[in-house]
């Protein structure tokens, strides 16, 4: 499948939703597909990211508990992940320009559905103002706020899932470190299976490979060798399949726990390992393994519960997390590391002269 067909299939999928989801008023592409040439291959290890925009009061926006509203579906052979957004996020150009999850995509031909012409009306203003310094600074502030919110989820994650929940949140926080560099270079933040691999290349080009090593150290994967990662991936595939067989309860990572997401998990990691980015593959494995431990310990057979506990304990020890004090220390390290990424991002924005007044 190429990018042209992927976009066409996604458009058809959105059209199919208009009669099924009351209040759907617009939709647009986000993520890497927005900048892919039509004839670029679209691998099966990628998904298409979409924002579905709903009128205020739509049932689709009603969130139950801490789990965000989103869809992860297989349509015409394509994996599609859709986040639900209120129309209030798109009320004015100013709201869009300050939001890195939206702004860059509306400078491109990303619109899939626009019932009222709302997105079309925003695009001209957003395209013109996008590189202005005040909006770049606003988007950097948006990423900082998101990172700080992620740190604030530590206690809730511990309450629901223990150390595995905290570890997932710690990893989630690293995506904001990558995102601030994207924002500074007038790009859209990209958080996919290979975000850590892309980040490694970018930091190496910038002469700041040390930051990448510190990020890997933060997550406890800096010294892991390739054979260990390969063995964990084999175990991870077995855990993923077992999880799909038993899960019935809600989980914060449930949008990735579907049969059609197997390649997105397993094959993406295998490709990174083959490319000699085994440590980065380990980063992508962490949330999947944590989710599997959570589900199997809660819903598995007695034998599965016991085995998951043993595997989880060994996994946490391999990452160097053997106490709550150590986890708290990692969260403090994460906050300090983010500051260095933010400082680098602001320097890049000035030195490369990307900003306009």
Image (tube, rainbow, N blue to C red):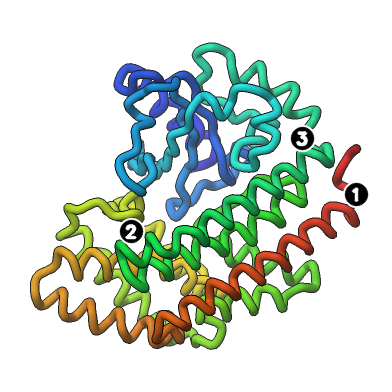
Q: Is disc 1 placed on a helix, strand or loop?
A: loop
Q: Which is more foreground, mark 2 or mark 1?
A: 1
Per the model, the C-alpha gap separating discs 2 and 1 is 42 Å
Q: Residues within 10 Å of mark 3 (few under 14, many from 20)?
A: many
Q: From this viewpoint, is residue 147 visible?
A: yes
Q: Which is more foreground, mark 3 or mark 2?
A: 3
Tell me the residue at 16%/80% (across/down). 306
Labelled pair 3, 2 in contact (Cβ < 8 Å)? no
Q: Nearer the viewer, residue 340 or 47?
A: 340
Q: In this image, 14 relative to 304: left or right?
A: right
Q: Give residue 331's position: percent from left, percent from top.
A: 53, 72
Task: Give the mark nearest the N terminus, 2 or 1.
Answer: 2
Tell me the residue at 50%/61% (across/down). 172
Task: Give the mark nearest the N terminus, 3 or 2.
Answer: 3
Tell me the residue at 27%/65% (across/down). 240
Q: Is residue 236 above or below residue 295?
A: below
Task: Give the mark nearest the N terminus, 3 or 1.
Answer: 3
Q: Give residue 150's position: percent from left, percent from top.
A: 51, 57
Q: Nearer the viewer, residue 268 or 24?
A: 24
Per the model, the C-alpha gap separating discs 3 and 2 is 37 Å
Q: How many marks?
A: 3
Q: Name the image quarter holding residue 31.
A: top right
Per the image, the residue denoted by label 1 is 353
Q: Give residue 159's position: percent from left, percent from top.
A: 32, 64
Q: Quadrant of the C terminus?
A: top right
Q: Residues within 10 Å of mark 2 (few under 14, many from 20)?
A: some
Residue 130's label in the rendered image is 3
Residue 262's label in the rendered image is 2
Q: Nearer the viewer, residue 204 or 219?
A: 219
């Amino acid at each position: 499948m190429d990018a042209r067909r992927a976009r066409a299939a996604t458009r058809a999928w959105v059209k199919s939703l208009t009669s099924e989801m009351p209040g759907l008023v617009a939709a647009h592409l986000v993520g890497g597909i927005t900048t892919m040439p039509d004839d670029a291959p679209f691998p099966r290890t990628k998904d298409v990211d979409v924002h579905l925009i709903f009128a205020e009061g739509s049932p689709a926006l009603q969130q139950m508990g801490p789990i965000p509203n989103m869809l992860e579906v297989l349509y015409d052979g394509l994996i599609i992940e859709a986040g639900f957004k209120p129309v209030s996020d798109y009320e004015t150009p100013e709201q869009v320009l300050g939001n890195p999850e939206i702004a860059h995509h509306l400078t491109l031909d990303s619109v899939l559905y626009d019932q009222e012409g709302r997105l079309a009306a925003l695009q001209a203003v957003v395209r013109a103002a996008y590189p202005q310094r005040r909006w770049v600074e606003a988007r950097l502030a948006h990423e900082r706020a998101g990172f700080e919110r992620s740190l604030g989820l530590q206690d809730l994650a511990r309450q629901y899932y223990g150390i595995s929940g905290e570890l997932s949140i710690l990893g989630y926080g690293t995506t904001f470190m990558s995102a601030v560099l994207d924002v500074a270079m007038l790009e859209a933040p990209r958080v996919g299976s290979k975000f850590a691999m892309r980040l490694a290349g970018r930091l190496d080009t910038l002469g700041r490979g040390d930051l990448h090593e510190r990020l890997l150290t933060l997550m406890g994967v800096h010294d892991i060798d390739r054979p260990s990662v390969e063995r964990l991936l084999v175990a991870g595939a077995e855990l993923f399949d077992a999880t799909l067989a038993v899960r019935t309860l809600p989980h914060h990572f449930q949008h990735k726990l579907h049969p059609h997401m197997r390649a997105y998990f397993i094959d993406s990691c295998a490709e990174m390992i083959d490319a000699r980015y085994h440590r980065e593959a380990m980063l992508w494995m962490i949330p999947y393994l944590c989710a599997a431990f959570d589900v199997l310990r809660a819903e598995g057979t007695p034998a599965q519960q016991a085995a998951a506990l043993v595997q989880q304990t060994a996994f946490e020890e391999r990452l160097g997390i053997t106490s709550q004090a150590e986890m708290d220390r990692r969260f403090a390290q994460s906050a300090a590391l983010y500051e260095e990424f933010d400082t680098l991002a602001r320097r890049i924005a000035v030195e490369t002269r990307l900003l306009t007044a």
